[in-house]
Image (cartoon, grey):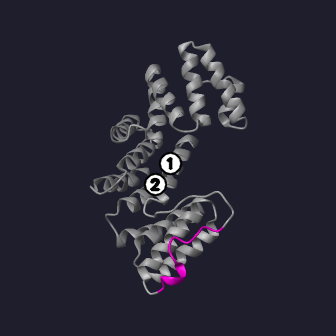
């Protein structure tokens, strides 16, 4: 799997981390306020587990892994049958490269809630990131099969990334198209389809997709580099120079900028 594909999958998993928890991200160093009264919910084990899982997810999102683990362990201690706590533990251990512990917790979560779409999505992402791309697809598809799944395009996009990692371009293209059919502004599918169209020589379509991506989210080194190469091939030197300046200004230490300096366009 390429660096760009790993980053894209990590973004998908980051979004999935909070899918089953209603938390608010923060970049401050202040403690995250309790989502409910942690002191007052001891009489309800499930509620206690839910609250500590939400807190664990929020701390994990902002990078406080040790605090996240503390809350998640409290959650499973309060209610050993709360599936989402184990799914979050799987994500945290995966981030720590503790793959055996990650798999154990994901499997425990699935044993408790085998049809939960977010848990299936998260486990599929873990499998993809650990080199088991073929195995991961069935978990993404199982997530999508749940009619209550609120964001099935996430799993289509993740399946597309895993297919790209196995160099199955046509299969990946189909997954990304399905994602965009369901959510026309899905950033992962947009940039991935833009890359595919560039490789196929469909420069106008690639340009349209990468422009849309750059307008929806903050441009990345990958998206600026792709846009630059599209404009170069189309002979639009002014636009090419504009993207080159953005790449230099925003991402001077990126691999993409180093490629630009060496003139390695393809």
- Label 2 Cα crowd, 10 Å radius (few <14 / some 14-19 / many 20+): many
Residue 247 percent across, percent down from the top left: 67, 30
For disc 1, the marked residue is 9
Residue 237 percent across, percent down from the top left: 62, 14
Please provide the residue range marked out in magenta: 31-42
- Report if residue 264 is visible in the image: no
Judge whether 219 appears above or below 52 on screen. above
- At mark 1, the secondary structure is helix
Q: Is residue 99 left or right of residue 166?
A: right
- At mark 2, the secondary structure is helix
- Label 1 Cα crowd, 10 Å radius (few <14 / some 14-19 / many 20+): many
Q: Gap between marks 1 and 2, in whole Å? A: 7 Å
Residue 216 percent across, percent down from the top left: 50, 36
Tell me which label, 1 or 2, sits earlier in the chain.
Answer: 1
For disc 2, the marked residue is 125
Q: Nearer the viewer, residue 145 or 166?
A: 145
Q: Nearer the viewer, residue 123 or 58?
A: 58
- Residue occupying the point 52% across, 43% down: 5
- Residue occupying the point 52% across, 54% down: 14
Residue 223 percent across, percent down from the top left: 56, 33
Q: Main secondary structure of the magenta part?
A: loop
Where on the picture, by quarter, is residue 69? bottom right
Q: Is residue 263 left or right of residue 157?
A: right
How many marks on residues? Answer: 2
- Residue occupying the point 49% across, 53% down: 15
- Residue 39 belongs to magenta span: yes
- Residue 114 belongs to magenta span: no
Q: Is residue 84 left or right of residue 29?
A: left
């Amino acid at each position: 799997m390429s660096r760009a594909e790993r980053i894209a999958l990590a973004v998908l998993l980051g979004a999935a981390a909070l899918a089953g928890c209603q938390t608010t991200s923060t970049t401050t160093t202040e403690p995250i306020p309790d989502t409910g009264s942690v002191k007052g919910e001891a009489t309800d084990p499930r509620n206690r587990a839910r609250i500590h899982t939400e807190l664990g997810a929020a701390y994990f999102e902002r990078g406080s892994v040790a605090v996240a683990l503390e809350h998640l362990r409290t959650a499973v201690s309060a209610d050993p049958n709360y599936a989402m706590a184990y799914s979050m533990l799987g994500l945290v251990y995966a981030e720590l490269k503790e793959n055996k512990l990650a798999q154990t917790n994901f499997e425990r979560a699935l044993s408790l809630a085998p049809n939960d779409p977010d848990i299936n999505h998260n486990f599929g992402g873990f499998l993809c990131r650990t080199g088991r791309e073929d195995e991961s697809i069935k978990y993404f598809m199982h997530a999508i099969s749940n009619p209550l799944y609120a964001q099935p395009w996430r799993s289509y996009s993740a399946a597309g990334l895993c297919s790209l990692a196995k160099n199955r371009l046509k299969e990946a293209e189909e997954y990304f198209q399905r994602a965009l059919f369901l959510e026309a502004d899905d950033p992962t599918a947009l940039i991935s389809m833009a890359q595919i169209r560039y490789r196929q020589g469909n420069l106008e379509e690639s340009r349209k997709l990468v422009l849309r991506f750059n307008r929806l989210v903050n441009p990345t080194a990958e998206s600026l580099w792709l846009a630059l190469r599209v404009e170069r091939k189309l002979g639009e030197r002014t636009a090419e120079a504009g993207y080159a300046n953005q790449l230099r200004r925003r991402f001077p230490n990126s691999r993409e900028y180093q490629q630009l300096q060496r003139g390695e366009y393809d």
